[in-house]
Amino acid sequence: MACLQRAQKSVVVRGEQQVLSAAMTQPRLVTKPLLAGRPVVPEASSVLLVGRAARQQLKATAAPPAPAPSSMPSQANTGNPRALISLSDKTNLDMLVKGLAELGIEIVSTGGTATSIQNAGVPCAKVEDVTGFPEMLDGRVKTLHPAVHGGILAIRDKPEHMAAIAKHNIGTIDLVIVNLYPFRKTVTSDPPPAFEVGVENIDIGGPAMIRAAAKNMAHVAVVVDPADYPELLEKLRQGAGSADFAEFKKKLAWKAFQHCSSYDAQVSEWLWSQVGSGPAPQITVPLQLAQTLRYGENPHQAAAFYTDSSLRESNAGGVATSVVHWGKEMSYNNYLDADAAYQCCCDYAEPTCVIVKHTNPCGIASRSDLREAYRLAVRADPISAFGGIVAFNRPVDADLAREIREFRSPQDNETKMFYEIVIAPGYTAEGLEVLKGKSKNLRILEAKPRAPSGLSLRQVAGGWLWQGADSLSPEGITFTCVSQAQPTAKQLDDLKFAWRAVKHVKSNAITIAKDGRLLGMGSGQPNRVNSVRIAIEKSAAEVQGSVLASDAFFPFSWGDSVEIACKAGVSAIVHPGGSLRDQDAIDCCNKYGVVLLTTGVRHFRH
């Protein structure tokens, strides 16, 4: 009681207002969200209103009561089938709305979509006519309303659902045709948008409508892809109550959920790029079916090819986004080999030709004249090159195309070389026509250049391995000479060429090179010494004065890889170093007068 009396004494009465003293130590009133129709009280200042003043303030700030059922807009329920359309991608919109109008389906739409529909000469109600509520918060709230979601989600054969929407004069919505804000396009633009702009392009109302319609697939058709408009109209003409249409709606629902899933994956990826680093705790990779393949690595294996819709792949280039100008349908193995060839070729800055067989480069050569580079790449291993993939990092003109078309195998100088694929960043018009004349089956691909970059995901049973691509190039490496013999400028250039090549060869990997061309390589052997022997054998007499690169250190040297290479005539060797027996490699090279360099990094490739 004493406390109450002390508080009362601090109140100063002035007319009809009662004001607390500034010395009042009571806490400030904090605004809290209240139910619709209840008073909304602003955050209190140091002045507390009580009595009649408080009642007047509450009356002045009270939100209007929720509308009675009879006050809902009359447009909400006409009894006719209705389609709700809200599109960012307005492809084929005219065809769609005219087809719906012919079928007697009323259209409700939002914002710019409504304007486009009206401009097409098709009657269209705006969503605010249905909800009785204007768009607000800069368009953030348009369709998030019971008059919309009640009409979508009501189960038509459930009496209590139909009674509930009838009570509020809510009409059913039978078609939901929605696609989402162009989030991916916005956040991958150059220059990148401000964080706030990216956030504003996250669609909220669209996914809510799509998911609601997809959930109620028994009664509502949801369309997110303009490619589905013709089939939708055809199904509607055949009869919306058919079993065929019911199955079609299920497929549309699957597509809708997948559409939202891919969209959310891109939003999540972007947000992680803003707030995190390294591997995210969870990732979803959005993939788009590009092609169902005849079979996988072998005829008994089913296969397909998907493109990666992740933000990191936007404008990245490479085989996945290549244009096939000519030839047979691409196969599973074609994609693997073409990717290996093109990434290796694009790793070289100089005009270069790379020939790959079973994902391993069997021929590489850099020359200002690409015709000569091509010839040298074939000569590195003409047996393996036959039936391989040929890649160039410069456009193919008519002269180069003729060289490819007419070149004979160095084995007999008679047999024309056969290839599965030629891939390059471009072709002259004449060059493309000349190359088409080589074979009706030759696949001719054009792709934006792409050296190893980005993220590498690889599947193992029950999981995935995540790593950054091996994008390390010789320019980013320190080559340290550890031998008595010092490299000449020419040897150093060849060592860098061989080191760049060995990165693209399957481990255990050895490359032997000279004069900017690959002479021989050994790949995929369980032990390094056998890879050395194979590379020397393929190099034949040209091994004299060549250089050798090893993707990992030499565990043994005497009577093993290093001494075998020295005795064969190799003049310089580069390897990562780091073995307990590195001194043996140094001593061996010193004995034979061979240059030995270390890089401190390795290039395993499994």
Image: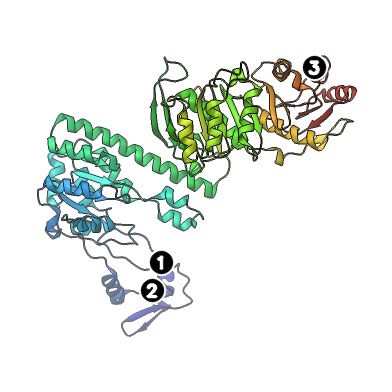
Residue 344, quarter of the rendered image: top right
Instruction: Please state the horizontal and vertical placement of residue 551, each as a whole percent of the image.
Output: 70, 27
Q: Distance between the residues labelled 1 and 3?
A: 86 Å
Residue for badge 3: 564
The 10 Å Cα crowd at callout 1, few under 14, some 14 to 19, many 20 or more, is: few
Pick whichever of labels 2 and 1 is earlier in the sequence.
1
Q: In the structure shown, which secondary structural element does the residue marked by tag 3 occupy?
A: helix
Q: In the picture, residue 346 is in which quadrant?
A: top right
Name the one closer to the observer, 94 or 382: 382
Q: Which amino acid does label 1 sit on?
A: Leu
Counting other residues with Cα less than 10 Å from the Cα at mark 3, is it few (<14), some (14-19), or many (20 or more)?
Answer: some
Q: Give the image location of residue 278, x and y in percent.
A: 58, 41
Q: Which residue lies furthest to the left in this view?
A: 79
Under circle 2, the secondary element is loop
Q: From the viewer's perspective, is 444 left or right of 161?
A: right
Identified by mark 2, the residue type is: Leu
Left or right of 484? Residue 248 is left
Residue 605 x %, y %: 63, 26
Residue 274 image position (x, y, % from top left): 53, 50
Residue at image mark 1: 29
Where does the C terminus fall, quadrant-wise?
top right
Q: Name the residue under label 2.
A: 48
